[in-house]
Amino acid sequence: MARIVIAEDEPHMLRLLEMTLRKGGHEWTACTDGSQAVAAATQQLPDIVILDVIMPVMDGLTALKALKSDPATAAIPVLMLTARGHSLTRQEAEESGAAAFLTKPFSPTEVLSTITGLLDKGGQAT
């Protein structure tokens, strides 16, 4: 079981992620923007953070950079989610320290497999 912070502003996607994490036996804190996720991750020090790229207030890439620049949260693996499959977004996320990147739509099995891989590899996706 992992402790996970999720940042996703689309209610139906958030529900899907919550059901997926419940099925995997994980605990989570749900946030609707990147600033909430950074605050939750800083306070809770979860095993993994899942960030949507496009969100209000603070987008996922900005939140990722904030997490990676703070020594307290820098080692937490971050899984980025986006509806955009643009290679530039993926490249920027990877260069900013994202451990994994999934493009929507994704399957719940794919999310759980990625989480397991991150936990097994100490935060580095293969």
Image (spheres, grey):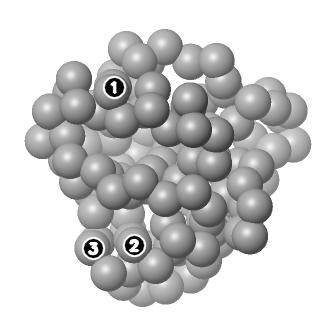
Within 10 angstroms of label 2, few (less than 14), some, or many (20 or more) residues?
many
**Residue at 61% across, 65% down:** 34
Residue 22, compared with residue 4, is above or below; it is above
**Residue at 56% across, 31% down:** 13
Q: Is residue 101 visible to us here?
A: no
Q: Which mark is residue 82?
A: none
32 and 90: which is toward the camera: 32
Quick check: marks 2 and 3 in contact, CB under 8 Å? yes
Cα–Cα span, label 2 and label 3:
6 Å
**Residue at 72% across, 55% down:** 55
Q: Which mark is residue 40?
A: 2
Residue that mark 3 sits on? 44
Q: Quadrant of the C terminus?
A: top left
Q: Is residue 5 left or right of residue 94?
A: left
Q: Which mark is residue 20?
A: 1
| Amino acid type indicated by mark 3 | Gln
Quick check: marks 1 and 3 in contact, CB under 8 Å? no
Residue 10, compared with residue 109, is above or below; it is below
| Amino acid type indicated by mark 2 | Ala
Q: Quadrant of residue 57?
A: bottom right
Closer to the chain start, of discs 1 and 3, is 1
Q: Quadrant of residue 89?
A: top right
Q: Is residue 47 visible to us here?
A: yes
**Residue at 71% across, 69% down:** 58
Q: Quadrant of the N terminus?
A: top left
Horizontal and vertical percent position of residue 20: 33, 26
Residue 106, compared with residue 43, is above or below; it is above
Quick check: marks 2 and 1 in contact, CB under 8 Å? no
